[in-house]
Image: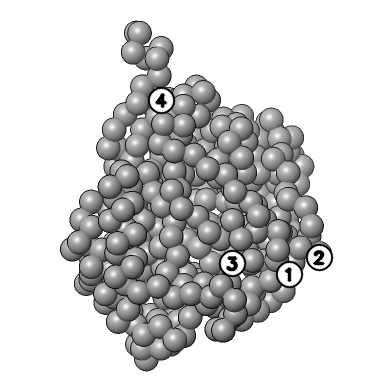
Amino acid sequence: MQLSTIYNKVRSGERLTREEGLFLLQKSELLELGDLASEIRFHKNPEQRVTFVVDTNPNYTNICNIDCIFCAFYRHPGDEGEYTYSVDRMIQKFKESAEKGVTTILLQGGVNPAIPFEYYVEMVERTVKEVPGVTPHFYSTSEILIMAEVSGLTVPQVLRRLWDAGQRTIPGGGAEILSDRVKKKISSKKGTSADWLNVMREAHKLGFKTTATMMYGHLEKEDDIVEHLEVVRQLQDEYHGFTAFIPWSFKPGNTPLEKIIPHYATPTRYLQMIAFSRIYLDDFDHIQASWFSEGKKTGQIALHFGADDFGGTILEENVHAAANFVNKTNTEECIELIHGAGFAAAQRTTLYDVLKLHPLATDLAA
């Protein structure tokens, strides 16, 4: 197997096998990988522009019973600082966010079996009714699974209730690495890779659009990364229900896993993940770079390694903050960062419809 053969195969539009993908990940030089990924990015999204969304990531509860060793956010019932907020309180928070220009609310919480299913449904119904300017991008697969457990409904029935309440998109959190070898070590109570994939599959069947995520930089090996991308790619083939793929690195601060993995993954590794995912996920339209999880400069560079989206402005975020990792921005700076990387900025919806284009100064001059 030779890299030149693989590069030619990619450029001709042929799909890589798992074996070829693993070889590419292990043997390719970063800049060559980035050049190839950038070619594919502009083939799929020809415009010299990068999208972003004005969003916020609040949490309704931090009580959780699955004890993932990579997480610093969760608390057990009775712990200092544990909370579960009422629907009224969350709706008020959503209204305040909407007044600041937010169009997407990515809402997630811990896996809290004390919360009744109707709480989740009411949250969606009231958001759609009372805060009509925002998209309720609610609930990870783990939360949907606990909804099924506490309600006695099946996953498809839970999803149908959320759909009927007005929800149309679901975030991709909870995937981490879709390799059960790794999941048994970092999130043994969370369920299997098949559980995450099944929730997403059933959501796509109903018409939901979702994102796919990957958290790397902990106990995974190269073949686990390829396995993750392979199963995500296979599911995308079935319904094309994923809008984007979003990788980010593990943040060890205050987590049980910090004793084993005390350091952040490098920016070089992040750029490799962005480029490789763009190449391997040939059925994905969008790859999202993250100024938030990797730093603003690294996020900008990732836009030249295959990413075409800059994520969100993230007005509020508590999970990474619990791990002592905080980056903040606003809409104006987000636009400036995209412009600084050499692209026009386009504010989008959750579903990638463009709301407003912010051209580069050179574009205006032309």
- Sequence-wise, the earlier of marks 4 and 3 is 3
Residue at disc 4, secondary structure: strand
Q: Which mark is residue 73?
A: 3
Residue shown at 50% from the left, 63% from the top: 173
**How far separated are the C-alphas under marks 4 and 3?**
35 Å
Residue 268 placed where, x, y %? 71, 39
Residue 33 lies in what quarter of the image?
top right
Number of numbered labels in the structure image = 4
Residue 147 placed where, x, y %? 40, 81
Q: Which residue is mark 2?
A: 259
- Sequence-wise, the earlier of marks 1 and 4 is 1
Q: Nearer the viewer, mark 1 or mark 4?
A: 1
Q: Which residue is mark 4?
A: 344
Q: Nearer the viewer, mark 4 or mark 3?
A: 3
**How far separated are the C-alphas under marks 1 and 2?**
6 Å
Q: Residue furthest front?
A: 80
Residue 182 lies in what quarter of the image?
bottom right
Q: Residue furthest left?
A: 129
**How far separated are the C-alphas under marks 4 and 2?**
42 Å
Q: Which amino acid does the dot numbered 4 rest on?
A: Ala
Residue at disc 2, secondary structure: helix
- Sequence-wise, the earlier of marks 2 and 3 is 3
- Whether residues under marks 1 and 2 lie with C-beta atoms below 8 angstroms apart, the answer is yes
Q: Residues within 10 Å of mark 4 (few under 14, many from 20)?
A: many
Q: Which mark is residue 256?
A: 1
Residue 125 can be seen in this image: yes
- Sequence-wise, the earlier of marks 4 and 2 is 2
